[in-house]
Image (cartoon, rainbow, N blue to C red):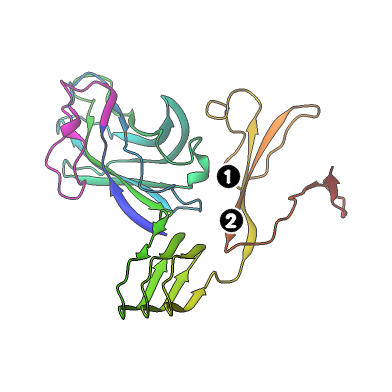
């Protein structure tokens, strides 16, 4: 696994901001001094694009985090601004990951939410958008309304490290490499070693392709070790979905890992997330069900 922090690279839309710009939102929320400027006429919202992460966001509860700087404006207003933080894709809501209200002051406050990347319709995260919506407080009379202004926003990404290529080639006569160590999926070509050259060992802690060829007379590779660890395959989560749209637009019946009650003869979808480590043997996944009160599970063929 690896981590990185991404900032917005596109301002998709906004409501009740005065001349907003991407530069109002693409900063570190902890240090930002820039905010969108509330126009004083209602609840605010802003929808932001993010760049594609270096690797696919990892699936798992609370691995992905969105953080944003927010503040109240108009100290004379009596209302308390409330907010929601949503994950969107292609202009469509995927999930609201957090809600709350701002404390009764005008100082910067950090709002945040976490989510599981299995809610994304695009596995590499390239379609992810974030909407910060003021849900209450911005309407009413002049002595009541208070706006919510958003500043810097960030996505703290937990992602899968990409493939690593480690070429070990062209080592001259009597030259040597003591140890080559690689963590992550790797291709390790060991080629073109001249006479009497050597590699002491190649240690790869994950999936690896070790390729040898073109070794000169008496050239050698001392040891190649691939440590993949124990292989596991387990169900990480499930979520019921209505059969009412595409992979992106279909609505959810309930929150993740929450049982649902559905009418008989109703089509529905079930998304199941499996977490695999190492390189387990191939296996056919099965889906089972049972009636409430029954003790025996039935396998769907």
**Magenta residues, as a range?**
10-37
Seen in the picture, residue 112 relative to 194 is either above or below; the reply is: above
| Whether residue 184 can be seen here | no
Residue 236 lies in the magenta stretch: no
| Whether residue 264 can be seen here | yes
Seen in the picture, residue 246 relative to 28 is either above or below; the reply is: above
Mark 1 or mark 2: whose residue is earlier in sequence: 1
Q: Quadrant of the C terminus?
A: top right
Residue 19 lies in the magenta stretch: yes
Element type where label 2 sits in the image: strand
How far across and how far down the image is residue 186, in percent? 45, 60
Residue 85 vs residue 191, the one in the foreground: 191
Q: Residues within 10 Å of mark 2 (few under 14, many from 20)?
A: few
How far across and how far down the image is residue 192, in percent? 38, 66
Seen in the picture, residue 196 relative to 56 is either above or below; the reply is: below
Asked which quadrant contains residue 228, the reply is bottom right
The residue labelled by disc 1 is 256
Asked which quadrant contains residue 280, the reply is bottom right
The residue labelled by disc 2 is 275
For the point 42% across and 31% down, which residue is it?
88
Q: Quadrant of the N terminus?
A: bottom left
For the point 21% across and 46% down, which residue is it?
29
Element type where label 1 sits in the image: loop
Seen in the picture, residue 51 relative to 282 is either above or below; the reply is: above
């Amino acid at each position: 696994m690896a981590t990185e922090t991404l900032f917005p690279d596109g301002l998709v839309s906004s409501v009740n901001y005065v001349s907003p710009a991407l530069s109002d939102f693409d900063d570190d929320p902890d240090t930002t001094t820039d905010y969108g400027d509330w126009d004083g006429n209602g609840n605010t919202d802003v929808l932001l694009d993010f760049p594609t992460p270096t690797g696919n966001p990892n699936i798992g509860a609370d691995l992905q985090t969105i953080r944003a700087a927010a503040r109240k404006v108009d100290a004379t207003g009596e209302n308390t601004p409330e907010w929601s933080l949503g994950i969107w894709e292609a202009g469509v809501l995927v999930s609201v990951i957090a809600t709350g209200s701002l404390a009764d002051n005008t100082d910067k406050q950090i709002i945040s939410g976490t989510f599981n990347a299995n809610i994304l319709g695009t596995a590499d995260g390239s379609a992810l958008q974030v909407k910060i919506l003021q849900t209450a407080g911005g309407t009413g009379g002049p002595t009541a309304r208070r706006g919510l202004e958003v500043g810097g926003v960030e996505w703290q990404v937990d992602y899968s490290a990409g493939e690593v290529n480690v070429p070990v080639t062209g080592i001259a006569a009597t030259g040597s490499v003591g140890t080559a160590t690689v963590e992550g999926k790797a291709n390790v070509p060991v080629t073109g070693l001249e006479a009497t050259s050597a590699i002491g060992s190649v240690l790869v802690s994950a999936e690896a392709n070790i390729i040898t060829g073109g070794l000169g007379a008496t050239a050698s590779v001392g040891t190649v070790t691939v440590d993949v660890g124990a292989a596991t395959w387990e169900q990480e989560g499930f979520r019921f979905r209505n059969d009412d749209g595409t992979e992106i637009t279909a609505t959810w019946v309930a929150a993740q890992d929450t049982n649902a009650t559905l009418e008989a003869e109703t089509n529905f979808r079930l998304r199941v997330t499996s977490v695999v480590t190492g390189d387990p043997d191939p296996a056919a996944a099965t889906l089972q069900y049972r009636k409430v009160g029954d003790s025996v599970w039935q396998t769907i063929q």
